[in-house]
Image (cartoon, grey):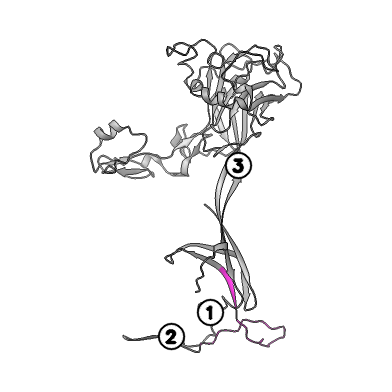
Amino acid sequence: MPLYKFKRNDIFYNQIKAYPQCDFFIYSGSTYYNNNPHLRRTAGDDDDAFIKHVPAGYVSLYELNIDRDASLHTYDPDAGTGTKALIFPFLTKDGSLSSFKTISTSQFNTDFVYGDEITGSYPLSASISKIRYAEGAPTSSNGTDSAFDMKKPHIYALRNTLNYYTKLSPHYAYSSSYNLEGTSHGGWDKGFQELGLLSIPSIFYGSSIKRGSVSLKFYITGTLIGELQDEGQNGALVQVAPTGSVSSAGEGSGSVAGVVLYNEGFIVLTGSWDISDGDSTDPYITAGGEAPKWIYFGQSIAESALTAENSAFHLSFKGTNYIPTITMLAHAEEGKQNLSSNPTYVEKGQALGAMTSSIFYKEPTGVKPKNTISSSFHEHTASFMKQTYISKIGIFDDDKNLIGVAKLATPVRKREDDAFTFKLKLDV
């Protein structure tokens, strides 16, 4: 088998920019991700009742322990006994002081001695979440900033980030005292106003959310009553449907109901007008029969006493993934790769055994290869020509260890006057 070294211009390193689509449908307290079926292995609503051991709408990191029976896992890491029915991460406490992020330094120092096995659990899961903040003044102060609100720690933590993106749109501003076009109020302060916060883990979008791809749809009893899009690609979520809809407060179609933090994976919803414009006959919120508003989007997945009724929500966007790729060019030049070590390459009946002794090793000479050239005439043998069929290309490291194999869908015939270049592409 011949070995050839890749030349300088035979290897290319590139990067693919992909935009994977993500869809979340929220209804009756359940979340559905990309319309994937959520299969059960046993009866019940706990995580272990499902094949992936995660609730509906969640992704399982690495997708380990698929369809494994958690009830059979009785392993005790302290005693080192029991049945290991599930895959789990583990490490041994040693001088490197390595540990899991979920174990604090004090717990690591006091609860484990050197040589103890520290274990974790799989699967690790993630999904979108929603937090609704009620309108009201701050309940406490840090002594210098009157806008410090312990009831809105997530919003306050995003204050500098929101203000940073005001270069894209003034709607990002944490607080503003002037009236913006399309609003009926004279300003706002996100530390005081009622709003909703949607959190999207980065496992769903990669490096960032693609600008112009975000869409939020609000349904009541199956009817679309409102849709938000970042049509300006500046992060401002504008109500685009139903076309021409206007609330009693003068807001609706064309109004900004929130902003998107593309790099951080957050959607801040501030639209507080009645989307149905008073036409909704069914109460949207069980407590008080509140009208549907953008700040209540995705409320059925929030940890709140307010629960959505007769409502469904659809969130869609595209992520941004950068995939490193390696392109390698393998050349089969003229006059080369026309011999094979395959035993079927020689004519049948020849002696192929090697002669060996304590002082020499000798392979047979004069072995005649089989003529595989077909003739156009019946029972006529064509003139002999060397030809092979290339079906696989091996990739070796510097120590000649096989690290990859590229298989061709159909073997390629290689004659002495043929020259081929095979393009091998690997996503890292």
Q: What's the mark number on residue 229?
A: none
Snapshot quadrant of residue 198: top right
Mark yes or no: residue 310 visible: no
> Can you say whether 179 is above or below 258 in the image?
above
Q: Secondary structure at mark 3?
A: loop
Instruction: Give the mark, 3 or 1, whose residue is nearer the N terminus.
Output: 3
Secondary structure at badge 2 equals loop
Q: Amino acid at mark 3?
A: Pro
Q: Residue at x 53, y 85 (%)?
A: 348
Answer with left or right where residue 251 lies relative to residue 206.
Answer: right
Between label 3 and label 1, give the one nearer the viewer: 3
Q: Residue furthest bottom?
A: 366
Q: Quadrant of residue 65?
A: top left
Residue 260, given in percent of the width and then of the height, sits at: 60, 28
Residue plotted at (34% across, 45% down) = 84
Q: Residues within 10 Å of mark 3 (few under 14, many from 20)?
A: some
Q: Amino acid at mark 2?
A: Glu
Find the distance from the CA under tag 3 to the CA under tag 1.
47 Å
Callout 1 secondary element: helix
Cα–Cα gap, marks 1 and 2 = 17 Å
Residue 122 appears in the picture as rendered = yes
Of labels 1 and 2, the one closer to you:
2
Crowdedness of circle 1 by 10 Å Cα count: few (<14), some, many (20+)? Answer: few
The magenta segment: 367-391
Which three-letter amino acid code belongs to the residue tagged 1?
Answer: Thr
Residue underneath mark 2 = 363
Query: Marks 2 and 1: in contact by CB < 8 Å?
Result: no
